[in-house]
């Protein structure tokens, strides 16, 4: 179903898939340690579900792998049956729907091992940051996790990965040191910069188009002293708070990663008072300095007076996932994000305006970029460094019916208003849930990068077996 975001029309790719042979499906079921479900099986609906409830997919079969051998068996089966394949961990970052293909679920691959000497974590494809943080924290180490600890480590990292330590340490994708991958022809190999330079480059931005990552090895940082949190003010003070934030952020050093947001808390019993049903403006920050230095850095924000709720305080690495108060339970979400050059008065006004009246938005935010995010390492993959100082990002809840149509319309209005301010490619991990069409995917990578991805696609996945999620169209090769 086509959907319009701003002036872009977004159309899901449609492809006919062969029907898998029933005897071969039966044999595969017998080989697996994990679970296989077809539409005839009771577990099918649970296994094809995503965190994002707007996303519908009807695969021919779902395999929930219990180990790497299951991934090899499933991909060998798909190769023989010429069946297209999608891979899903949590379903936070949905894309092109896996209709008629084999959906490989990684949720049981949650093993995490930390090597404190090499400062490397080996992380299974189904792990979320909540599985990783306690184990790294025990060694005084931290990964470059994002605002939300419940997203999958692999999907987040290989889509870029923008988190609380980003202005000092860059995108999480740059911390990848090795990938354990099963390719479309069921070859299982370890990919490093030295052993497989082309695949190492392509996977760090194009993962779901090249194979199934069974495990990732990430370099960890020594945990710095952390200080920060979130403070909230009434939405009526949005313009004033955003202006104070803009002045403060303009001179903040790289050790500070922060955001300012207009947040609409739902009127639900689980939301604590005084936030229940409230529209608020939040300022959130993570400072990699000791308490005294951090307090001094945050002091200019105190001119806003006592917040309605929240505080800045010393943080443990485990607290990083709680700063943003992101939703945990599955929901029907749609979003849009763009990198913008600087926090101009027009952009401040655009954000402040989202606090006015009744609107179907959950959050509209500006995240501070720059610092290490602007610097690509020598072995950077396909993901371009953000070409501006801020990320403007909005999310809506999209219920069925007219309320959902209003949510889409609000997002489209914001996308149109943002268009003149766009400074460069969107970050792949922030591509909105409906933004899977060729035009929007093209915007995420420069022409030369698309051409190299397309050539590697033709080499490693000539039959376009991996055509779901965030695909790399073969046509990009030119
Ligand atoms: C509430 C919320 C908060 C978020 N906060 C942040 C944030 O702070 N910073 C940030 O950078 N992003 C953020 N994101 C975006 C998030 O990082 C992406 O949506 C990410 O792709 C989610 O990964 P996943 O594995 O959980 O989701 P999935 O939907 O399971 O996977 C996402 C993509 O990765 C591919 N993939 C997953 N596992 C594998 C694998 N093993 N091998 C190959 N491909 C694989 C999938 O095919 C799919 O294309 C947020 C998203 C949501 C919904």
Image: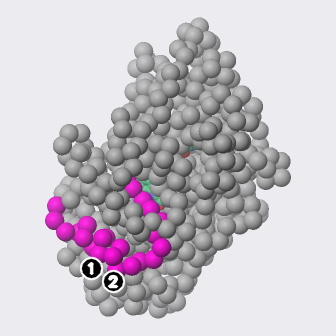
User: Where does the N terminus fall, quadrant-wise?
Assistant: top left
Which range is magenta?
Answer: 335-358
Q: What residue would you read off at disc 2?
A: 243
Please name the residue shown 73% across and 49% down the image.
Answer: 200
Q: Residue furthest front?
A: 478
Q: Which residue is mark 1?
A: 239
Question: Crowdedness of circle 1 by 10 Å Cα count: few (<14), some, many (20+)?
Answer: some
Toward the viewer: 249 or 461?
A: 461
- Determine the residue located farthest toward the top in the rendered image: 23
* Vertical arrangement, residue 151 with respect to residue 393, above or below: above
| Percent coordinates x, y for residue 99 in the rendering | 46, 27
Which residue ends up furthest to the left in the rendered image?
357
Q: Decide: is 29 above or below 425.
A: above
Q: Quadrant of the C terminus?
A: top right
Residue 46 x/y as whole percent: 41, 30
Q: Secondary structure at mark 1?
A: helix
Q: Is residue 31 above or below residue 248?
A: above
Determine whether the residue tagged by mark 2 lies in a helix, strand or loop: helix
Mark 2, residues whose alpha carbon is within 10 Å: few (<14), some, or many (≥20)?
Answer: some
Q: Residue at x 52, y 64 (%)?
A: 424
| Residue 354: image location, x then y, percent | 25, 67
Residue 349 highlighted magenta (yes or no): yes
Q: Residue at x 31, y 55 (%)?
A: 411
User: Are the residues flagged by discs 1 and 2 in contact, CB closer than 8 Å?
Assistant: yes
Residue 468 numbered mark, or none: none
Q: Quadrant of residue 86?
A: top right
């Amino acid at each position: 179903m086509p959907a319009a975001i701003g002036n872009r029309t977004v159309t899901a790719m449609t492809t006919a898939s062969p029907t898998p042979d029933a005897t071969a499906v039966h044999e595969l079921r017998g080989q697996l340690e994990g679970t296989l479900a077809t539409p005839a099986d009771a577990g099918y609906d649970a296994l094809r579900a995503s965190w994002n409830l707007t996303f519908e997919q009807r695969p021919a079969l779902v395999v929930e792998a219990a180990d790497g051998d299951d991934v090899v068996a499933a991909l060998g089966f798909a190769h023989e049956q010429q069946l297209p394949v999608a891979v899903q961990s949590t379903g936070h970052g949905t894309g092109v729907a896996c209709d008629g293909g084999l959906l490989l679920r990684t949720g049981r691959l949650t093993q995490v091992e930390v090597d404190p000497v090499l400062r490397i974590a080996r992380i299974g494809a189904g792990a979320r940051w909540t599985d990783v943080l306690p184990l790294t924290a025990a060694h005084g180490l931290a990964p470059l996790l994002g605002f939300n600890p419940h997203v999958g480590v692999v999907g987040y990292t290989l889509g870029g990965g923008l988190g609380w330590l980003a202005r000092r340490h860059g995108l999480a994708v740059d911390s990848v040191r090795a990938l354990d991958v099963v390719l479309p022809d069921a070859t299982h190999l370890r990919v490093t910069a030295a052993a497989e330079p082309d695949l190492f480059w392509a996977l760090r931005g194009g993962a779901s188009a090249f194979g199934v990552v069974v495990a990732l090895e990430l370099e960890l940082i020594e945990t710095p002293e952390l200080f920060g949190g979130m403070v909230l003010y009434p939405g009526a003070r949005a313009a004033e708070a955003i202006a104070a934030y803009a002045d403060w952020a303009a001179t903040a050093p790289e050790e500070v990663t922060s955001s300012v947001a207009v947040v609409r808390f739902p009127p639900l019993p689980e939301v604590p008072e005084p936030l229940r049903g409230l529209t608020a403006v939040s300022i959130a920050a993570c400072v990699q300095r000791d308490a005294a230095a951090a307090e001094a850095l945050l002091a200019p924000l105190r001119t806003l007076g006592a917040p309605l709720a929240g505080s800045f305080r010393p943080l443990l690495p485990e607290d990083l996932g709680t700063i943003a108060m992101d939703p945990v339970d599955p929901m029907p979400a749609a979003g849009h994000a763009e990198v913008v050059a600087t926090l101009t008065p027009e952009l401040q006004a655009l954000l402040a305006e989202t606090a006015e009246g009744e609107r179907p938005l959950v959050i509209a935010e500006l995240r501070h970029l720059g610092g290490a995010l602007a610097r690509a390492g020598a072995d950077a993959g396909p993901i371009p460094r953000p070409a501006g100082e801020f990320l403007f990002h909005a999310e809506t809840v999209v219920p069925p019916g007219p309320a959902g149509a209003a949510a889409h319309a609000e997002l489209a209005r914001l996308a149109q208003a943002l268009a003149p301010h766009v400074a460069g490619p969107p970050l792949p991990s922030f591509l909105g849930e409906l933004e899977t069409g060729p035009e929007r995917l093209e915007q995420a990578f420069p022409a030369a990068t698309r051409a190299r991805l397309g050539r590697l696609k033709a080499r490693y996945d000539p039959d376009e077996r991996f055509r779901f999620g965030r695909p790399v169209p073969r046509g990009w090769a030119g």
